[in-house]
Image (cartoon, helix red, strand yellow):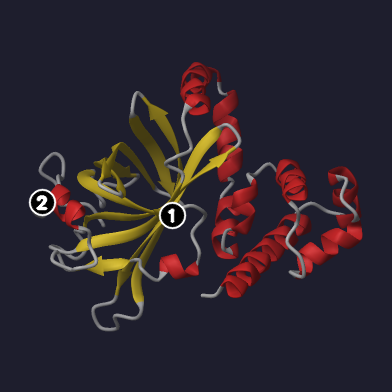
Amino acid sequence: MTMHDDTALLAENFAANLRFLCERSGSISDVCRKMKINRQQVNKYMSGAHIPSVQNRRLIAQYFGVSPEVLFVDNEEFRMLIEGNYFHALETFRHAARFSSFLETSLLHQRAASDVHIGMYDRYQYSSIYRGKILRSAFCLYRNRDFLQHYYIERFPSFDRPTKADYVFKYHGFTIPLEGRMFSVDFEVGQKNEMTFGIYAPVRRSAKNFMFGITSGIAATMLRPPYATKVAMHYQGPGMLQKEHLKRVTTLEENDPSIPVEVRQFLGSDEMLPRSGLAGPRR
């Protein structure tokens, strides 16, 4: 993809996301007045003809209650974030009495934490849908106001038609840096019945950045039993996930040369850890 194509894609994503937000907010004239941005300029943004200046991005993001970076996410993912009331859920957490003390403690660490780990990752773990294979998903860590948030996408190709996906799972959550570790909690937004938790340690191997850790999850039904497994994340660069990153989401053979050596060493053999003698996880 050329620089021109990349800029055009960002403008297209921003335009689609801004149109979506404005359609949900009533009168565009009122929105422009409250944002203090000229209506004619907003029309250019919504048409994809221009990308807003940094200052106007901040005004738009502040008005709609998201971070500026999120406005450039692929429109399908953006709609998932907004329609799933994910941002509203965090605001509800923020004001919950029992959660407030925990948030105050975590936010102190969040504000002091460096943003060095923010960006896109290839996320690796063993799959139990396709036993013996490694699942590579696309993971993004980004800042939204006081919080570090993340989302990731898993895709399982069909045995009969490898170019098609039999299963797609999408997770959104938030990450808390604490004492040199990264704690995460997220929710599957398609079936809306699974919550997962993770703890990771950032590691630098020569010029490569990784996070190695473990994740565990439980669904609302025991047809999908609790599980725990190792996870390795390999940093790919700054920014938000785009379509070209999602093309890499698939399952791989254990010896696939595209898997970093450090990841294969950390994951070891096929180590899925189902609890209470139940079958393995749904991944």
Element type where label 1 sits in the image: strand
| Residue highlighted by disc 1 | 237
Residue at the extreme bottom: 161
Rendered residue at 35%/73% (across/down) = 165
Horizontal side, residue 157 vs residue 16: left or right: left
Front-lying residue, 78 or 278: 78
- Type of amino acid at the residue the image marks with label 2: Gly
Say if residue 171 shows up in the picture.
no
Rendered residue at 23%/43% (across/down) = 226
Query: Which one is earlier in the sequence, the residue at label 2 or at label 1?
Result: 1
2 or 1: mark nearer the eye: 1
Q: Is residue 245 above or below residue 227?
A: below
| Residue highlighted by disc 2 | 268
Quarter of the picture holding the C terminus:
bottom left
Q: Where residue 154 sits: x, y (%)? A: 36, 60
Q: Where residue 219 sits: x, y (%)? A: 32, 46
Element type where label 2 sits in the image: loop
Front-lying residue, 105 or 256: 256
